[in-house]
Amino acid sequence: MRLSTVEIAAAVGGAHEGRSRPVDDYRFDVRELGTSPNELFVAGHHRFLRDDTNRHTPRAVSADRPYLCEVAPVGGTAIVVAEVEPAMLALGRYVRPRLTDRCIGITGSVGKTTVKQLTAAATSTTYRTHATPRSFNTKFSMPGVLASAPSDTECLVLEFGARYRGDLHLMGGVAKPSVAIITKLGWAHQGSMIGQAGIVATKGELVEDLPASGTAVISTDDPLAQGLPGRTTATVLTYGSVGDVRATGVRLSGDLSLSLSVATPWGEADLRPAVRGEHHVTNVLASLAGALAVGVPLDAAVAGIEQAEPPARRMQMHRIDRDILVIDDSFNATLESVLGALEALAAIDAPDRLAVMGPLVDGKAYVELIHTIARERAEQLGLEMLAYRAPNYGTPVVEHRRQLRERVDALPDGSAVLIKGSRNDVIDEVIAELIDHPGI
């Protein structure tokens, strides 16, 4: 929807400076400025405005670009607030009544963005859908997703992240989902949530706050999710091996593409989802259940999931010289996603299979343990692990791109290489060496 900066300032309790400007898009990273004609830059920290030596600041603010900030404005159109995060939540509350009641909220420890992508593809077959871009799933960015929704949106598909208890009560109270999908629960953010019990308590906030007329989409296979149905008055729609929405047959091809036969309360169907790897079966079922819960016909939901744009850097396949298959699964690296990726690599028929592992930074309170679990699982699967600038695996560490290249050079033709690790400069070096400059 289009708002004016004067209207936004009034909605968030901010002071308006400069002339009023139209806004229908929101930017949270200065490196993305200039991609939309009516964008508002939301400055999450004063350094974006005042420290010209910071690498993020070139072109950060100018007289022709409106911005929201906590500090004295530097010219142009500005909305000055006491704190950015509460201001953005206030903006979300302001725009939410103007939008459709049909809203799917997605949270969990792993699979959120994939499920969001597949669910949005399914609902788009039936409704004008507005979905969270990339992973804009925080208290800071989610309200901007709401405010950027076109006024004629018929279905919202929103991703919710959480680091602390109460986060989802707060965000859910703003977004008011009618359907809540809980993806796999596990290790992510255990430190800030105080263990797995804290994760379950926090993620369960989204189903607790559903209206009685809503639907909670919950896994039957996740041990941590078993108590969630008792925390909601909404209808519970389950997915999983014995769920209401379940796979009655799973076929995995040599390139990790999936074929599923599914049974649902709305009928049965066969589908070939756009994601790869058997560990994505649960994500496909969750997405299908969420789309069915808001009234998407089964055949339309299946078609949407089959035609979905696969999420970037999640099991993306690249063939480089000598027919070596490089699997880029480097978007993030929760322990659960690491184990799933290792199992997918083990399922590939190749003369040699190498897991190039960067450091895992999620779950800092358990950093040594999660690296050890990953190494032991690779050993159980018969995979070679190459730790790239990541000492916590307890294996010899490769520190230089040249050493990485030498190891890949030594692989037999037709081998498979997995790239996995928390998204950072280290893992980007691996991508640059093996995919961006693949010559061997």
Image (cartoon, helix red, strand yellow):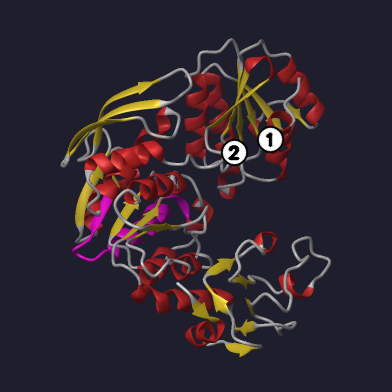
Label 1 Cα crowd, 10 Å radius (few <14 / some 14-19 / many 20+): some
The reply to whether discs 1 and 2 touch (Cβ–Cβ < 8 Å) is yes
Which residue corresponds to mark 1? 431
Identity of the residue drawn at 29% across and 62% down: 102
Q: Amino acid at mark 1?
A: Ile
Identity of the residue drawn at 47% across and 31% down: 340
Label 2 Cα crowd, 10 Å radius (few <14 / some 14-19 / many 20+): many
Residue 124 image position (x, y, % from top left): 35, 51
Q: Amino acid at mark 2?
A: Ser
Element under disc 1: helix
Element under disc 2: loop
Q: Quadrant of residue 173?
A: bottom left
N-term mark: 1 or 2: 2
67 over 277 or under it: above or below = below
Q: Quadrant of the N terminus?
A: bottom left
Q: Which residues are magenta?
A: 194-217
256 over 44 or under it: above or below = above
Which residue corresponds to mark 2? 330
